[in-house]
Image: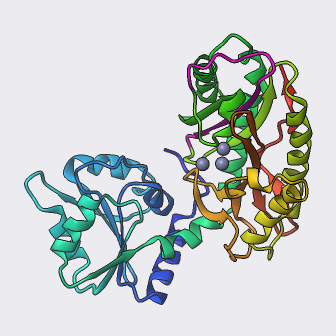
Amino acid sequence: MDAPGYDFRSRLSGVQRAAGQSGIDAVLVTPGPDLRYLIGYDAVPLERLTCLVVPADGDPVLVVPGLEELAAQASPAGPLGLQILTWGETEDPCALVASVAAGARRVAVDDHMWAQKVLGLRAAMPGAEQVLAGPVIHPLRMRKDDAEIAALQAAGRAIDQVHAAVPEVLRAGRTEREVGRDIAEMIIAAGHRTVDFVIVASGPNGASPHHEISDRVIEHGDAVVVDIGGTMPSGYCSDSTRMYAVGEPPSQFLQWFGILLQAQRAAVEAVRPGLTCSQVDAVARDLLDAHGLADLFIHRTGHGIGLETHEEPYIVSGNELPLEPGMAFSIEPGFYARGLFGARIEDIVVCTDAGWQSMNHSTHELVVV
Ligand code: ZN
Ligand code: ZN
Ligand code: ZN
């Protein structure tokens, strides 16, 4: 896993600084996006404990099972010169972590740590209070640097390529499942390492935002929501929704779709530093509301994206976090009319000094196949 340009040293020292300011003595990070962010080690979460110990003061230490030592050294964690401590099959890894973090009164555990590990570490460190590490790690992950923005751009190009090819596989008479299978292959062919989700929601199925695929046969006149995403070899994710119609969709749909296009565009164009997440949500919501569609827009406007498809910042009413350059998130308003149809348009945008930059460039118009 090559990760040129990622400054792991400054990420680690950023976490140490934030931990110190929060009165946290050590941050414990097991395999997952936080570990990948901090040291580039893309380890699979398994029953054997792998744990990065980042003390507020002092050098970080990576604790790994003996059989994972070479894999850890081969990852970007190796060149980083991190101390790697191993444990043997019959040893207690939680006791080893406890000895590395000896004296810690307050430890932060990563938000996705398995309960089995959380409780094991609690038992091994009875004097230490456990808190979540999200508040010290996620503010860093939320602000993407240039290398991360380049990775999101590459992910955007790859998923745009898939949307451009959807008309080749979407047609009346095929099931959502058949179309979804073809799209999944195209997601990999476009350069993703994994397919994270494929939503092909035709006709009335479009009214369920998280409908994935079914055996429903796509019919003439259906509007079809295609929301797809995957993870690139860099670890960064794509996520884009476009709307298709097989022949002529209902006129009510076309009228509402025109309003949705305006709302999505307006929310994207509103993005700039200082505007709050709540305000971005309101731009899309108010426009739909002005046309009587607010009740049909049943979810938040967007979510942050990076090493995870859904991460901070959440573009939702009540989130008063101001946007800053480097924040990356989706803008994906929709409308969902039960029993009839649904629609959503989604781009990933990055907040810049001047405003915004989109990671997606495929057409936003309804694509009629
Ligand atoms: Zn979702
Ligand atoms: Zn999304
Ligand atoms: Zn999506």
Relative to residue 217, is residue 62 depicted above or below?
A: below
Relative to residue 333, is residue 181 depicted above or below?
A: above
Q: Does the magenta stretch include residue 204?
A: no
Residue 213 in percent (x, y) is at: 58, 28
Q: In which quarter of the image is residue 193?
A: top right
Q: Quadrant of residue 215?
A: top right
| Segment colored magenta | 214-233
Front residue of 367 and 193: 367
Q: What is the number of callouts on the image?
A: 0
Residue at left offset 20%, top offset 85%: 127
Residue at left offset 79%, top offset 34%: 243
> Do we see residue 191 in this rendering?
no
Residue 298 relative to residue 285: left or right: left
Residue 321 in percent (x, y) is at: 68, 76
Residue 231 relative to residue 76: left or right: right
> Do we see residue 2 in this rendering?
yes
Residue 227 in percent (x, y) is at: 67, 37
Residue 17 relative to residue 285: left or right: left
Colour scheme of the picture: rainbow
Front residue of 211 and 290: 290
Residue at left offset 63%, top offset 40%: 208
> Which quadrant is the C terminus positioned in?
top right
Relative to residue 297, is residue 337 depicted above or below?
A: above
Residue 98 in percent (x, y) is at: 20, 74
